[in-house]
Amino acid sequence: MNRSTARRRRGVILTPQGLQKLVQARTEAERQFNDGKRFTLEHLSDLTGISVDSLTRVFKAETGVDRETLKHCFAAFDLVLSEADYFQPGVPEPLKPQEEPESLAEIDFPDGQVSLNSPLYVERFAFGDPTRESLEMECYRAIERPGILIRIKAPRLMGKTSLVNRILHHAETLGCHAISIRFQLADKAIFQDLERFLQWFCANVGLGLRLPNRFADYWDAIFGSKISCKMYFEEYLLAQATAPIALALDDIDRLFQYPDLADEFFGLLRAWHEEAKNRDIWRKLRLVIAHSTQVYIPLSTNKSPFNVGFPVELPPFTPEQIQDLAERHQLDWSTQETQQLLALVGGYPYLVRLAFYHLWRGTLASSELLQLSPAAIAIYQEHLQYLLWNLEQEPQLWQAFAQVLQAAAPVELELITAFKLQSMGLVHLQDKHATVSCELYRRYFRDRLQPRA
């Protein structure tokens, strides 16, 4: 199969802009008329005159409903539906004069986060249960709470950054300052000294607030770096901020490589979260933490930010989500092919999207993909070589993963090793017992990884 005829899909779907507008209006109505408690679907049905089934499809924004349904839903919250609030899958917008068709040309190569306005973003559901509210919606509600701490865990390439950016975008619609700190951007030398690290951290938050550094005024060596950092936030950054700060810390598990620094910094984050329960100034700080693996450094219970707040664990794509994403790529994709692809790439979003991108472009046939031909391996080559290089840097990981590959049953691994392999997406864990996460990894690494003496 090269470029395939799209299945016919009826109805329209809310754009991210339209969905945000509707969710914000619903939240405001809940505050005014329901003491801030969520409306049930039955309550929303009474309010809008729309069936529960149709409302579920409206708020999932994955399958189409008729335009009048959206219009009535918006009107129930005193909103007017505009053309920017919805789209019809597979139907290009009318062309402007001298403009080339853009409907299919807008599918970009999946090389990172999914853009906020992308029609290819797939919402996730806890335990894969689409009858529940999506994890995105739960996160949007959570970030509205003063002093909240949201912690997101998933292996690499599972969509953490895409979700974090959507949470920050929602926070911006609420009037918050949205700031993202990427620890991957910090020089290695920054992590060698706690005071230097905390000043780097504070300076980056100040940069997001467009505030100049004032360490000379608020940083006092007598108190030490942690109390100075707390004073800098409390008396300067939070005090000067004209709105709540939604602060996202991505790739935070990079700090696990520096246990002493991590212990101090994570304890500080936990202390700030606890401060928000008693002091209004700290209720202005809303934290989002994203990490790829279980915390494998020793942290005391009352110093860890990983056992408080609102936990989110991103699951792989379900068969239904893979099928839906195939249709968004205008692929005529069967249920059997979906099951085969699920076994091949384990439902990992990046691996699924990469496959569909090449199928859509016509550079790969479905038979080549599902048989894992050399052409199929080639589209994943860069990703696979990156994983191989990382395994080669740590002989212990190399040995452990080689054992998992060769075993017919789950292998019990040392805990930290198991967590590291899981963070790379290479294994699934049941307690400390590991199995290979997908057939792609099994077949590629089987002949390349042999236990080393």
Image: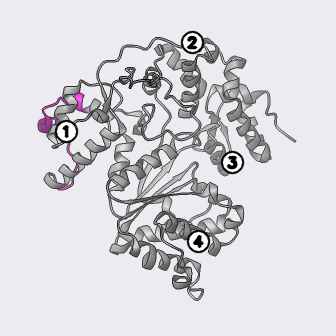
Q: Which residue is mark 2?
A: 2
Q: Is residue 9 visible?
A: yes
The label number, if any, that marks residue 198 in the structure image: 4
Counting residues from the N terminus, which is met first, the one under dot 2 or under dot 1? 2
- Residue type (three-letter) at the residue carrying disc 4: Leu
Measured Cα–Cα span from mark 2 to mark 1: 41 Å
Position of 138 relative to 304 (above/below): above
Q: Position of residue 273 (x, y in %)?
A: 42, 67
Element assignment for label 1: loop
Amino acid carrying label 1: it is Val
Measure the alpha-carbon separation of dots 1 and 3.
Answer: 54 Å
Q: Residue at x 82, y 37 (%)?
A: 451
- Mark 3 vs mark 2, foreground winner is 2
Q: 126 and 402: which one is in front? A: 126
Residue ID for mark 3:
417
Q: Is residue 72 magenta?
A: no
Along the line of sight, the residue nearer the viewer: 197 or 275? 197
Determine whether 196 is above or below 330 in the image. below
Where is mark 1, residue-wise? 80
Q: Secondary structure at mark 4?
A: helix
Q: Which residues are magenta?
A: 35-55
Q: Nearer the viewer, mark 1 or mark 4?
A: 1
The 10 Å Cα crowd at callout 3, few under 14, some 14 to 19, many 20 or more, is some
Please tell me in which quadrant of the rendered image residue 156 appears. Answer: top right
- In the picture, the quarter occupied by the N terminus is top right
Q: Earlier in the sequence, mark 1 or mark 3?
A: 1
Magenta stretch encompasses residue 41 = yes
